[in-house]
Amino acid sequence: MDFSRARRTFLFAAAGGWSRAADRSSAPSEQQRLRDPATEFEVIRLTDPSRHTAVFPAAPLRAVARNNTLIYCSDRSGSMQVWRMDLKSGESRQLTDVSSLNPSCVSLTQNERSLCYVDGERLVVQSGTRIQAPYAVETGWQAAGGFALSDDGLTASLVEKRNERFRLRLLAVRTGGGARTIYEADQPVRFCRFRPKRSSLLYNYNGVLTLVNFDGRGSRRLAITGSAGFALWSADGRAVQYLSIPEGRASIQLREHLPETGEDQLIGGTTQFVSF
């Protein structure tokens, strides 16, 4: 698969963008100001959990837009769909009408002109009223999470499962762009992280962090401390911050690793972190 060619021929930045998609349904504000009992800070509850389930895309998936709106998933319409919330008014509008949305696999592109998500066994890209499915999982395999999107919105990752076998695929986010398997084993992939400003991907399987190039070459395990939990890249892509989980989980550590030098240092200890 020629990812450089995919970069040059990317066509999903349709005029109007995702924010002008035809609205299928709307919901009034559910915002409420509350006092956090742990910190005594004032917080704003955006959705009402007594009315419906709401899921916010986890970092580093992009969900907050520069026009003071955000996207999230909700089942208030009877099935899980993507909604857009105006943070000023609190009003939400439904953006999708699909049958099998995976709420953990939803993201805006970096330029905020397109919405990407996994519906059943297909990757969908939605720009305004234009909807395309550039990739469908092969028969016999099932989409199994691991969705991530590169900074330029041209490449996505997706984990697939067949029986007890797992594989990690890199997808060109354009129709006919192709896909490449860069990992396949009997160990599931917990998450994927595209490295900022570089054509490489970090993924976690069984607590091991592995860095690999888009072409599948240069794969190497990072010499981290303990077993890795949640992890995120620094904005410049030089360092990865991760949770180090020792045997027995006695004291979880937040650590930083520099892939180029192998330096691994403690940021701080904690017993509470599960993500950051």
Image (tube, rainbow, N blue to C red):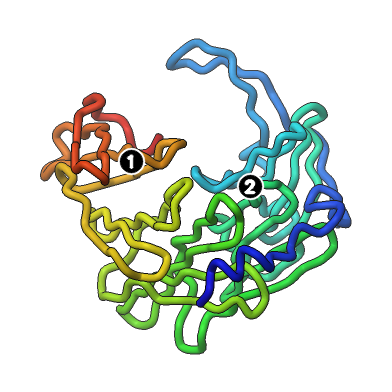
Q: Nearer the viewer, residue 219 or 143?
A: 219
Tell me where residue 34 appears, x and y as whole percent. Answer: 61, 18
Reading the chain from its start, which is encountered first: label 1 or label 2? 2
**Residue at mark 1:** 240
Tell me where residue 139 appears, x and y as whole percent. Answer: 51, 89
Q: Quadrant of the C terminus?
A: top left
84 is higher (above) or lower (below) than 211: above
Say which quarter of the image contains residue 155.
bottom right
Say which quarter of the image contains residue 32.
top right
Circles 1 and 2, Cβ within 8 Å, touching? The answer is: no
Tell me where residue 40 appears, x and y as whole percent. Answer: 50, 10
Mark 1 nearby-residue class (10 Å; few <14, some 14–19, many ≥20) = many
Residue type, label 1:
Val
Which residue is at 26% across, 45% downward? 260
Q: Is residue 22 left or right of residue 75?
A: right
Q: Nearer the viewer, residue 188 or 149?
A: 149
**Residue at mark 2:** 110
The span from disc 1 to disc 2 (Cα, nearest Å) is: 20 Å
Label 2 residue SS = loop
Which residue is at 33% across, 38% downward? 239
Tell me where residue 241 appears, x and y as whole percent. Answer: 32, 37
